[in-house]
Amino acid sequence: MKKSFLSQRKDDHLDIVLAPAEALQRQDPGWSQIRFEHCALPELALEQIDLSASLLGIGLRAPLLISSMTGGAERASRINHHLAEAAQALSIAMGVGSQRVSLRTGNDQGLTGELRRLAPDIPLLANLGAAQLREADGLDLARRAVDSLQANALIIHLNPLQEAVQPEGDRDWRGVLERIAALCAALPVPVIIKEVGAGISPTVARRLVEAGVRMIDVAGAGGTSWAAVEAQRARSDVDHKVAMAFADWGIPTAQCLLALRRALPNLPLIASGGIADGIDAAKAIRLGADLVGQAAGVLQAATESTEAVLEHFEIVLRQLRIVCFCTGSRNLAELRRARLLGNRLDPA
């Protein structure tokens, strides 16, 4: 089947994100500014540390979310298959990439009920871009996104910077908040809002909560820079220069997470954006994240096999468990109170 323009664009994105790291500029997500105080006498058994968490009332083995990712139709189907199998085996949550292509074209990208069959017991999160809500059938599209996966919630992703530097981007965002509010009122499952790498400020988060949003993924700067990705796709020197000027734009993830937790202490938060390993995940939890998401970090493994994804996350889990051990934390609640050494972010 001939690729649609949208499918080709997603395939381009996948090629660029999988390229060597030096091809993309990345901002410091801020984890280096956080340092745990080492506990030389933990009085714990490593294997008895409890990493369990929950999302939307569903128990998880660990506070991990396979964050949204996508690509060209054939590769995306294989990637999503591997991720769903691994998420089920690990008992962690999974969010899919944007379903716009699968709902608008014949290329389903593996985003069908097959994912729910592969992962029947985990929180599965559907995904649609905020700009699509402005379309005439935006609410219906959102319902279809949820129904096609039997999803437990719907992620609406905010990507104004990416759309602004993308030659074919959606640049009219008037009324998006109103459409989000209408969606929250109409949809039978919770709505989660995430950025795609520039972060969400407390001011915006409060407006989203007032609109009915149940959870926010901060998705701060420090992971994939979609401005840099679009710069790589640019067909003219002018477009490249415009996009690259914003390669380090955004609120660093650690700073974003800390600000949101202080401003909205009861709001469930997902931390994504530059989570490299289990130590970064532990730092995110210490700053107030309920769940930690990773996308680009596991993408290469996801292109290979389910076993590669399992190995990747088993490493992350071992690292997270050792952080708990070396801070004297028996569980995630105690990790959130673990002592820190002096740092510039100065978390309480």
Image (tube, rainbow, N blue to C red):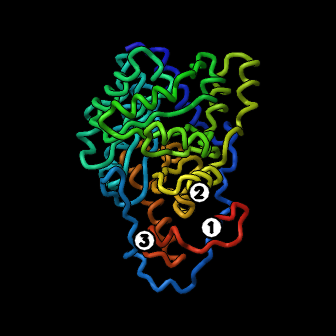
Q: Is residue 140 above or below residue 267?
A: above
- Image coordinates for residue 331, horizontal then vertical, percent: 42, 71
Front residue of this view, candidates 221 and 320 = 221
Judging by the rendered image, the residue that carries numbered circle 3 is: 331
Judging by the rendered image, the residue that carries numbered circle 1 is: 348
User: Which numbered marker is on residue 209?
Assistant: none
Q: Residue at x 42, y 23 (%)?
A: 100
Name which residue type carries label 1.
Ala
Query: Which one is in front in this view, the residue at disc 2 or the one at disc 3?
Result: 2
For mark 3, give the secondary structure: loop
Within 10 Å of the Cα at label 2, are there few (<14), some (14-19), or many (20+) other Cα atoms? some
Q: Residue at x 33, y 32 (%)?
A: 187
Q: Is residue 278 above or below residue 334?
A: above
Residue 106 falls left or right of residue 265? left
Lower position in the chain sequence, tag 1 or tag 2? 2
- Residue 164 visible in the displayed image: yes
Q: Residue at x 70, y 35 (%)?
A: 247
Q: Are marks 1 and 2 in contact (CB under 8 Å)?
A: yes
On-image quarter of the C terminus: bottom right
How far apart marks 1 and 2 lie (CA) works out to 9 Å
Name which residue type carries label 3.
Asn
Q: Residue at x 56, y 55 (%)?
A: 261
